[in-house]
């Protein structure tokens, strides 16, 4: 009986980890199963075959070349993309767009509007976009705060330079407490307006500045 329960926990855990893209807490699991989980933590934390723990060029290539099925690759990439979006999007705004597109792909796949090969190709493209963005940050030789500013402004200013993003980042450093000090936030906003308005025009100045102020500083 215990062996059967352990097998069920193992199967349940594998399915849960495959299809869940967020940290999971089961509030309805029975007392007996909870005890089995405590005794078999390694079983409950089972991962998909060839699961990737980080998303980089080497990891993506390894997944592409692995012998696992395309379905498992889709589940792996979906889960990894959801993880990086959840953990990094506040400081890397370009991830919000990737996250939205990933959700649409997942929904279309679950509704059988696209097949496994199309879903895999689409997820691989999103993963590559994330990898390319990280590579661009290194190529530009800027920190995460400056790169986040750069990605926001690049959407509004096609010919934006790295120095312009650095200038705005320097303005932020002069008001380190702006997130909880209203006086500093007001002063920072005024300084940003002076720099942002010539770049995007009066009509877009407020929206772009608001987006910059929402960025999570790291």
Image (spheres, rainbow, N blue to C red):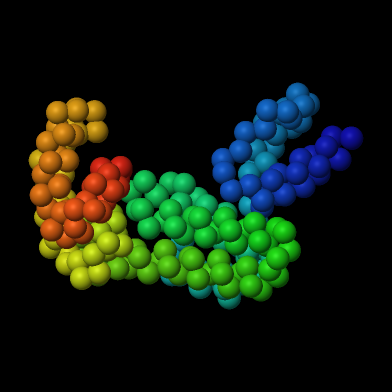
Q: Residue furthest bottom?
A: 65
Q: Residue furthest top?
A: 31
Position of residue 86 measured from the top left corner of the image (x, y, whole percent): 46, 47
- Tell me if 165 is positioned left or right of 31 in this view: left
Q: How many marks?
A: 0
Q: Is residue 203 above or below residue 155?
A: above
- Tell me if 13 is positioned left or right of 136 in this view: right
Q: Is residue 42 above or below residue 27?
A: below
Where is the N terminus found, in terms of image quarters? top right
Q: Is residue 67 above or below residue 218?
A: below
Q: Nearer the viewer, residue 13 or 108?
A: 108
Position of residue 212 measured from the top left corner of the image (x, y, whole percent): 26, 48
Where is the C terminus found, in terms of image quarters? top left
Q: Is residue 46 visible?
A: no
Q: Residue at x 67, y 51 (%)?
A: 19
- Tell me if 29 is positioned left or right of 165 in this view: right
Position of residue 63 measured from the top left corner of the image (x, y, whole percent): 56, 69
Within the image, what quadrant is residue 31 found in? top right
Q: Is residue 160 visible?
A: yes
Q: Residue furthest right?
A: 1
- Tell me if 36 is positioned left or right of 92 in this view: right
Q: Residue at x 66, y 61 (%)?
A: 108
Q: Nearer the viewer, residue 155 or 15?
A: 155
Q: Residue at x 31, y 62 (%)?
A: 155
Q: Residue at x 25, y 54 (%)?
A: 204
Position of residue 87 measured from the top left corner of the image (x, y, whole percent): 43, 46
């Amino acid at each position: 009986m215990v062996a059967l329960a352990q097998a069920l926990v193992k199967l349940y855990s594998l399915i849960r980890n495959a299809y869940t893209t967020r940290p999971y807490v089961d509030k309805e699991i029975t007392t007996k199963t909870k005890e089995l989980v405590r005794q078999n933590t390694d079983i409950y934390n089972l991962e998909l075959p060839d699961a990737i723990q980080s998303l980089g060029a080497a990891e993506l290539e390894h997944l592409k070349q692995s012998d696992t099925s395309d379905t498992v690759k889709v589940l792996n990439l979906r889960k990894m993309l959801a993880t990086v979006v959840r953990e990094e999007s506040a400081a890397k705004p370009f991830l919000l767009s990737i996250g939205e597109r990933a959700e649409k792909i997942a929904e279309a796949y679950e509704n059988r509007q696209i097949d496994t090969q199309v879903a895999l190709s689409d997820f691989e493209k999103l993963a590559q976009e994330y990898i390319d963005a990280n590579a661009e940050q290194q190529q530009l030789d800027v920190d995460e705060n400056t790169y986040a500013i750069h990605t926001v402004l690049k959407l509004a200013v096609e010919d934006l330079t790295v120095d312009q993003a650095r200038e705005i980042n320097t303005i932020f450093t002069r008001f380190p407490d702006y997130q909880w000090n209203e006086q500093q936030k007001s002063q920072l906003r005024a300084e940003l307006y002076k720099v942002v308005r010539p770049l995007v025009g009066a009509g877009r100045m407020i929206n772009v500045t608001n987006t910059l102020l929402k960025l999570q500083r790291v």
